[in-house]
Image: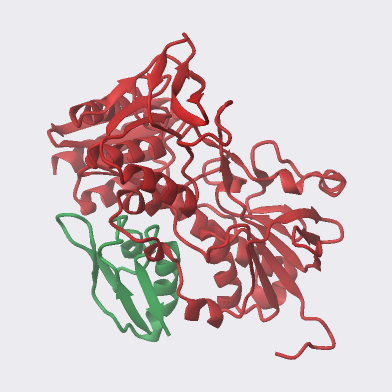
Chain colours: A green, B red
Amino acid sequence: MQITIDEAKCCGAGQCVLVAPEVFDQRDEDGIVVLLDATPDAGQHAAVREAATICPAAAIQVRE
Amino acid sequence: MSAAHTPRPRIAVVGAAAAGLAAAEGLRRLGWDGEITLVGDEPHPPYDRPPLSKHVLSGSWEPERTALRDAGQLTELGLDLRLGTRAVAYDPERRALTLGDAGRTVLRCAGVIVATGVLPRTLPGGDGVEGVHVLRTLDDALALRRRLATPGRRLAVVGGGVLGAEAAAVARALGHQVTLVGTEDTVMGRVLGPEVGRLLADVHRAQGVTLRSGQAVTGIRAEAGRATGVVLANGTVVEADDVLLAIGSVPAVDWLRGPGAEAVGLDLSDGLRCDEFCAAAPGLYGAGDVARWYHPGLGRELRIEHRMNASEQGLAAARNLLAELDPERFGERRPFTPVPYFWSDQYDLKLQAHGVLAGADRTEVRVLGKDPLRLAALYGTAGRATGILTIGLPPRRTRSLRALIATPAPWPEAITGLTETVEA
């Protein structure tokens, strides 16, 4: 799994952090997503797919 | 692909925006290996709507950037994708979906997910008049953007909800003369309450938007087929070159009406009424703006026209439809009990809301700064906190506030949590 994010699309909702806190975080100042792990191991895949689906700004892309 | 002798079972997803795409993707990801027909009435592949009243309208994004998936990703899903096609009827007893294409194709389905969204409300006298706009589709946004490409236009925005407020902010930032016309003296006051609504109205005024409140808009004034303004209930006219109607929307359910719907008791009175599993009838599920469903955590029905709910509910409807069709393989159905979320960008302000705000019987607003506006607000119903709003607060604090309403806390406890969080 390879994750890419588009910071310019991110709206700072933080839904990805709620779903997959080991993979995503947010910048303190503006809430923009911070990718902690672009190639997470299999245990994280289901959470990452859900984060990508529900991201309200469609800022997370997942390639498998 | 060669045609199989035994037809593969089919699930049809009607509506190809965020909710429909999430449903189609969810079906595949969860293991549905039958046909998936995705029907969309617009010619465009699935795209994202929130940027339409923000980056697309302002001209900072080209329309391609709103695409939710690229061509390769859509191909990988193996969809029977029917764009530019409308569903015109559904018989829930026969599970037969009729398309509005030339051949009036009838598709027999194992199940159907309805994600047809909403249609913008309009005003009398506006049909076919140049300069009268709604803002729902990509084509709508591009049409208004073309008009705003000419400097110094006078734009009347009718409706002080989130769509009108965002469009007004964009048009003002582009230097146009903007009048926001609504019945209330607030911006987004119906959802955010009068106190926050007045603060937001102040923000728009400070940015140079003219607010005209207290009078309903009764019609469009036009000369020679071109809009020249909007007419208020007391007869006065707000002069404008362009008029944006942002006065709410109606769920796109008319195509579902008919004897079949009546036979199974579909309730189409405010969207497609669904149960806690997003089911409207056996084999028929709803998702996104069009679906009114029973939220068991809140003990009430909700119909949410926000972007995140579209995806979440699309996925939930997909999962529950599969569970209904084959519980041994796909497991039990699960109630859909989300904590809703929406955001809005106006000028440099970002509004973030979690939970349910509309219809609250109490609010507690803590203003932390006025220039720029910074605040946190709590919304409650029947003694429990159900929603929070923040403007200009760091994300970690917004998340702490969300925890207060994820499981609705008693109001006094939530107020204590609000105080601790904003003073941290």
- Residue B111 seen by the camera: yes
Q: Quadrant of the C terminus of chain A?
A: bottom left
> Could you tell me which residue is drawn at 66 percent across and 49 percent down?
B275
In the image, what residue occupies the spot 65% across and 71% down? B331
**Residue drawn 84% across the image and 88% down it:** B5
- Observer-nearest of B64 and A27: B64
Question: In this image, B28 relative to A30: left or right?
Answer: right
| Residue placed furthest toward the top | B234
Residue lying at the far front of the rendered structure: B224
Residue B339 % position (x, y): 44, 50
From the image, which quarter does the N terminus of chain A lie in? bottom left
Where residue B259 appears, as percent x and y from the top left, is 87, 45
Q: Is A43 placed left or right of B18 in the picture?
A: left
In the image, is residue B391 above or below residue B201?
A: below
Q: Residue at x 49, y 36 (%)?
A: B130
Foreground residue among B404 and A56: A56
- Among the 4 quarters of the image, the one containing residue B237: top left
**Location of residue B403 with respect to A36 vertically, above or below:** above
The answer to whether any part of residue B339 appears in the image is no
Residue lying farthest to the bottom in this orientation = B2
In this picture, is B18 found above or below B377? below
Q: Is residue B222 left or right of residue B170?
A: right
Q: Is residue B376 left or right of residue B134?
A: left
Residue B253 percent coordinates (x, y):
69, 45
